[in-house]
Structures are given as structure tokens and as C-alpha cells.
Image (tube, helix red, strand yellow):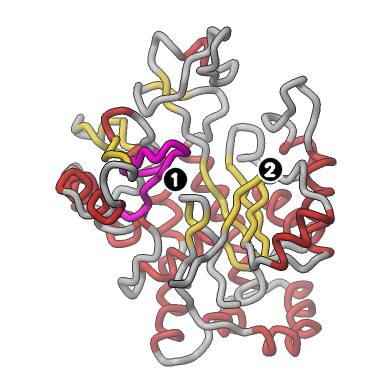
Amino acid sequence: MRVLHTLQTNGTLIDDEWAKFFKQNNYLVGVSVDGPRDMHEAFRVTKGGEGSFDDVIRGWKCLQKHKVDANILCTIHAANADHPLKVYRFFRDELKAEYIQLIPIVERATAETIALANFGWGGRKGTDRPLYRQAGGLVTDRTVEAEKFGKFLIAIFDEWVKRDVGKVFVTTFDVALGSWPGQHNSCIVSPTCGGALAMEHNGDVYSCDHHVEPEYLLGNVRETPLGDLVRSDKQRRFGQAKYDTLPAYCRKCPVLFACYGECPRNRFIKTPTGEDGLNYLCEGYKAFFLHIDRPMRIMADLVRKGRYADEIMRLIPASPGEAADRNVKAELSSKRNRRLAPVRQQGGKQACLTNR
């Protein structure tokens, strides 16, 4: 049996000793960074309310120093959604990141919890802040707006497809590329789900790491073999429900094949006709998938013919400055071309596509 070690961390405590350990044991490490200092520290602060940016970047540099397999996980939220290129270029040009995950923040709340939830989630004894649950039709102030989420992805994609294909791997784009020829590389865009279970420290196993709540408890590995829990009828029903509960609006959508309603945890708004179950991010995802249709078709066709997806950069018009940059990096790019590879999972979340 081959065991893959992955870790998702805020990076604040990573030092040389930890980095050496990760390298020696072939860890894939994801570091949570939300962009330049002002955007990162909008929500990522210490318990004392101090900024964490310097500690995070120090940890990231330790990983780079020891050549640890690492990627960036960036959450898209109210504080950085208006600055897609600033965020992307910071990762690419300043942090020299080659693998980037972009995860939208959608925090649900009820009318009873929204006021407290906007101050942050709690659940610990001695606090009056609510424990987060996938419930309610309202969203917190931190949540990214659906339209802005779509524009965020589009802006980064338009730069990436002209100059960075094969050099910078953005999970959302890699997963989307797989969807065009029917290769679904992530649970959130697959017709069904149920393969990303979560196990707590006490052995409790839940249907999904986004649903660690009582109604999604499958059992405990101290009492039932893990394989039996994974193959249980309850888990099968959970995975199949992703498709079965799609509203008619989604089933008629021209980009259903690229989305399949995305993650069920975000399906809490109504369709234009009043049907329940539309994804909160639908407007953004639909705009993004429609926008990238032509370049995705081109790249999918290239891969299908045994060629490389980065050949598209010679087919998409570029500005004079971008064209000059391409020429300078042409030789390096040819050495680093990679074919489409399966997406690796990290910490229960989709992780950057890699073929190392």
C-alpha cells in the first residue's frame, strides 16, 4: 500500500526543522495565503487580533528553502474578490508559487445567527459565538458575492491562458479542463460525490469534510471497518443525492457538464422559477464556464491528440509585452511541459494538479 502524506496549514509555525521533516517524508504541504498583506490580514489574524502575514511568509520561504512539495491555498472572500490579478501576480511573481488553489468562501447563517456570525464563528465554551453549520439562507459579510467570484476567476484565467499554461497550475482551471472531455477530477464538479470522507480524532467518520455534523455521521472505525462505512447505503445515498437533487434549471444548463451543481453545501438559494436547490455561486460559475468554453475546447483537443495544453498560448492573441515575455521563457517552458494528470486530494479539499 502506498501512503501519501499531505498537510494543510496556515504556515505560521513552520521552521527549518519542520521543513526538513516534510522533505524527508515526502509531504505535500498546502499553505493558506489570501494574497498581499492587506488582503490576507483582513480575516487571517491571531487570537490576539494581530496580523499573521509575516509568519506565514516566513513559513512558506522555509518550505521553498528545503524544496518541499508545496502549494498555495487562497480563499476568495469579500476583502480580495475585487483584486484578482493583484492576488494572482503576488503568488506567481513574489512567492514564486507554481501550484495554486482558489476556494470561494461561502458562510451560511440563519436570521438568528447572522449578527453573531459576522463577528466570527465560535463553538468553544465560554463564548456566545455560534458553531458553524451548513444551515440558513443568509451569508456572512466575509462571503464572496457570486458575480464577483466569476469575475475573479475570469480575470485570472485570461492572464493564465495567455502566458502561464504549463508553468503555473491553478486547480480550478485544471479541473475544468478535465470536464470538457468528460474527465471529472474533483468531487465538486462530478455528477455524484461521496469519495472525500472525513475522520475525526476519535474515529468518527462523516460523509464529507464539509458535513462534519451529526446527521452525516456514518459510524466509528473502532466499531465498524472503514471500508464498510465507505460502502454503506447511507454514504451511497449521500453521493447520489448530488445529482438526484439538481433542480430543473441546472439540468437544462449548457454548462452542466462542467459543474453538476457544484458542492451541495452551497445549494441553498432558489432558481429564477422559484425552485429550491440552486447553488449560491451559480451566477459566477456559469459566467466563468461560458467564458472559457472556446479555450477549453482547444486545450482539450490538443490533449486528445497527444499534444500539450500549453500550445494554446501560441493561439491566443497576446499584447506586445506578453509576446516578448513568451519568447524569453520559451526554452524553459518546453522543458517543463506536463500532460494532464489526475488531481491530487489534500486535506479533504481539491489540491493542485501535479505530475511531479
Say which residue appears at 66% left-offset and 39% top-offset: 80
> Could you tell me if the residues under marks 2 and 1 are in contact, i.e. CB atoms within 8 Å?
no
The answer to whether residue 66 is above or below residue 86 is below
Residue 235 lies, in percent from the top left, at 22, 47
Compared across the picture, whether 79 is left or right of 206 comes to right
Q: Please name the residue that numbered disc 2 is placed on.
A: 10
Q: Mark 2 or 1, which is nearer the eye? A: 2
Q: Earlier in the sequence, mark 2 or mark 1?
A: 2
Give the residues in magenta. Answer: 194-210
Residue 173 lies, in percent from the top left, at 50, 63
Compared across the picture, whether 247 is left or right of 167 comes to left
Magenta stretch containing residue 245, yes or no? no
Q: Is residue 249 visible?
A: no
- Disc 1 marks a residue whose amino acid type is Gly
Extreme-front residue of the structure: 222
Query: Helix, strand or loop at disc 1?
Result: helix
Say which quarter of the image contains residue 138: top left
